[in-house]
Image: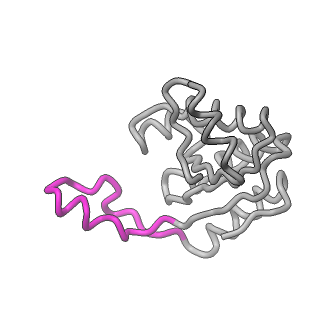
Amino acid sequence: LDTNGYIRKYTPVIDEVLDVTDLVMLDIKQIKDDVHQDLIGVSNKRTLDFARYLHKIGKATWIRYVVVPGYTDDEESAHLLGQFIQEMDNIEKIELLPYHKLGAHKWEAMGETYPLEGVNPPSKETMDKIVSVLKQYHSNVKY
C-alpha cells in the first residue's frame, strides 16, 4: 500500500485493508508541521498519527521522504524525522526520493502555476547529507 497516510477518520475498513497488506510505503513529506502546511497545504498530524498506528499494530512499513531543496533538505528536519521513527521497530527502510520536475507539465496543462517553480532537484551532496543524518537513527536508508 503506497499512501500519504492522510486518514480523516479511522473505520473498520482501514483495518480490513491493512489486514491484507504486507507492506505500507508511507510518504512523510515533512516532519515539521508548519513547513508541511506550506508545502502541502494541510497539517501532517494525520500522517504522523497513521505512522504511530502502523507501529502499534506492527505493520511492516517503509518511510518515503521526498528531499525538496528549501523545504525538506535541512539537517534539523532529518534529525526530527529520525527521532520520530527511531523506536518504531516496524520501519524496515527509509527511502529518500530526490525531488524532480516531472509533474510540472500537469500543472501547466491545467492552467495553474506550478507551486515549486524555480526549485531544482537536490544535489548528490545534499542527498548524502540527509542519508548520513538518518543513518544515525536507522541502519537502512537508501536513495
In the rendered image, the vertical position of residue 121 relative to residue 112, given as above or below: below
Image: magenta residue range = 99-122
The rendered magenta stretch, by its main secondary structure, is classed as loop
Q: Nearer the viewer, residue 140 or 130?
A: 140
The reply to whether the magenta stretch includes residue 113 is: yes
In the displayed structure, 55 sits above or below 125; it is: above
- The residue at 53%/45% (across/down) is 4
Q: Is residue 88 magenta?
A: no
Q: From the viewer's perspective, tell me whether residue 141 is left or right of residue 40.
A: right
Q: Nearer the viewer, residue 22 or 99?
A: 22
> Where is residue 126 drawn, in percent x and y?
62, 67
Image x and y of residue 142, in percent: 71, 68
User: Is the residue 107 above or below the residue 85 in the image?
Assistant: below
Q: Which quadrant, please, contains the C terminus?
A: bottom right
| Residue 36 sits above or below residue 23 on the image | above
Q: Quadrant of residue 57?
A: top right
The residue lying at 76 percent from left, 50 percent from top is: 60
Who is closer to the viewer here, 102 or 2?
2
Residue 136 location, quadrant: bottom right
The image position of residue 43, as x and y in percent, is: 49, 31
The residue under the point 35% across, 57% down is 116
